Amino acid sequence: MTLQTPLHRPSGLHNSPTSLTAARSLTLLLAVVAFLFASPLHAQLAGKGSIRGTVADSTGAAIPGAAIVITNVSTAARQQTLSTGAGNYQFSLDPGKYTSAVTRAGFKTFTQENVVVDALQTFSVNPVLETGSVSESVTVTDTPPALETSNATLGVTMEQEMYASLPIIQDGGGQRRATDFASLLPGVSANVSNGNLTTNSGIVNGGGSRGASSAIYINGVPITSVAGEGDPRFVWTSMAVDAINQFQVQTVGYSAIYEGQGVQNYIVKNGTNQIHGVVYDYFRNTALDTWGFTKVNNPLTGLPAKPVERQNEYGLFAGFPIIKDKLFVFGGYEGYRFSRQVPNQQETIPTEAMRAGNFTGQFGTATAALFDPNSTVCGNTACTSYVRTPFRGLLNGVPTLNVIPSSRLSPVALKMQSFLPASTGDLANNYVTNYSTGLNNWTTTNRIDYTLNAKQSVSLVIAFGRQSTTGPAAVVVSSGTNTNGLPPPYISTQQFAPKTKVFLFEHTYAISPHVTNQFKYGYGRYDGPASTRIRAEPSPPQPSASRDFLPARHPTPSPLPPSAAIPISIAGPDTPPTAPSPPATSPSTTSSGTSASTPSLSAVRSPGSSTTTSSTTPA
């Protein structure tokens, strides 16, 4: 449609920039008004479902001006509109079950019951009015066909009752997540190479090997991480499975208002006129476990022992009315507790004698010596070779070969050694890892819905969550790597305690029978306290004040060989002990809570995501 507005000006006057700007603004305003009111369009509000159709008589002729009233069965919320000159109508609705009533003078009242609406989907209801009195009625109780032929959208809706009944794998990997079930739907693959399903929404229709391209929506509001699309942590870390009413996955032909390669939309449960709720506890315990194929002995006791694992996921959610037909609330809490004993593994650590500087009997022969690096002098006049003096510290009051004097031990090194556990006294495999790891998570999801009047309604969602480790993650001790199961700060894994906050606000205003304005605001934050990574590695060699030392069989002059790193720092006699170089630090740049291969106590921080949308939709 083209709208032309003639502009007249008195003769002798020229167009000024101001007058041209005003003319263009007026033309644009008139075009917008004509666009909104002259020819109503079929549109759908973000995160809503819709019902559309055509009102006709028994001959198939369109009936204009018919009054259509649709009522939510659970909340008694009502919307009404009039059919257009072509008999068309449309509603944008929250997911739920509805009853539609159509009246027009000269025709019987038509009532369609059991109309089920899902978010992001459109359902057709085409009333056929019979000639008669308005006081007469025709009621259809059968559910209308769910097959939608008015668009090419390809997608699936999964109700909470369905995925909550699916089998649960409780392997300590985390609590149930509604976002995991998306990979069960057609067109979605869980085979991601970028992270895992806790941080990645998966691959849609084979598009890309990394995944993380599907847009994540909560009640139609996009909640996007700065790391990119497809991060489901705003959902599962703050919203329990039993707090999600339904979710949709659309892979092809979805509306242009949604972004991403594929769309996932999660709808939070709401209160109704009927009190409803759930109480649950899913648990796993060592007492219920069977023995493995072979019994494994505990190396500390020598007796057979089952791996210790305890897991509980419990919660309470309820919805009810505060003011019947107007004000509803829904909310609850879920906790997740998991703990297990890390498999026992043997490691080699310095013995207590070594930590005190006593290396007697450690080099195979009585003549092998430990030399003082600060005693290095030239072995000849050309200084082409060097000699060193062996250590002879006091042991039980007697100068003894290969004993480092206590005055030469660095206080910094001694402090670091204080964190080492006790050894068994053997030179090798003298420590057995023995610690527990686990998770202590919780979420709370709450929603308030208020119908202001027949034209306006507001909705508010507030959700919080925390995922926290109760101990360092389990490690696999391997030779030639820096993985270890020692206590902090030496352990080669990290602990984390990220927190999630999600805030959603929605205001819907039916301005006229054919124009509805929707305002949405969303805020999401996933973060945790930052900390410094601690590396359990020796500091670089320092000149004079701190050097590596080398064992040798006899003090034969020889060039200095390459240094061998040993975690003991030796201070020179004329130089005060010097602290080793600061530990290497590396700020975390990911928003993931997975463990790293280097010793770390770092947490993560992902800046908050804030989204505001406002749309005026002709219907």
Image (spheres, helix red, strand yellow):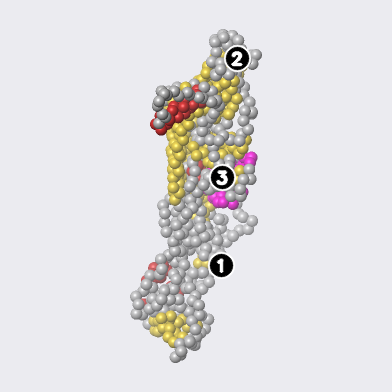
* Residue 163 visible to the viewer: no
Q: Calculate the distance from the C-alpha at mark 2 to the C-alpha at mark 1.
A: 81 Å
Which portion, as a residue range, is magenta? 172-196
> Residue at left 64%, top 56%?
293
Tell me if residue 586 can be seen.
yes
Left or right, residue 206 beside residue 438: right
The residue to which callout 2 is attached is 129
- Cα distance, mark 3 to mark 1? 39 Å
Of helix, strand and loop, which mostly describes the magenta segment? loop
Residue position marked by numbered label 1 in the rendering: 479
Q: Residue furthest bottom?
A: 381
What residue is pinned by disc 3? 213
Q: Few, some or many C-alpha atoms within 10 Å of disc 2 (few <14, some 14-19, many ≥20)?
A: many
**Towards the viewer: 95 or 418:** 95
Confirm whether the magenta stretch covers residue 193: yes
Quarter location, residue 158? top right
Q: Amino acid at mark 1?
A: Ser
Question: Where's residue 530, x and y in %?
Answer: 42, 54
Q: Are marks 3 and 2 in contact (CB under 8 Å)?
A: no
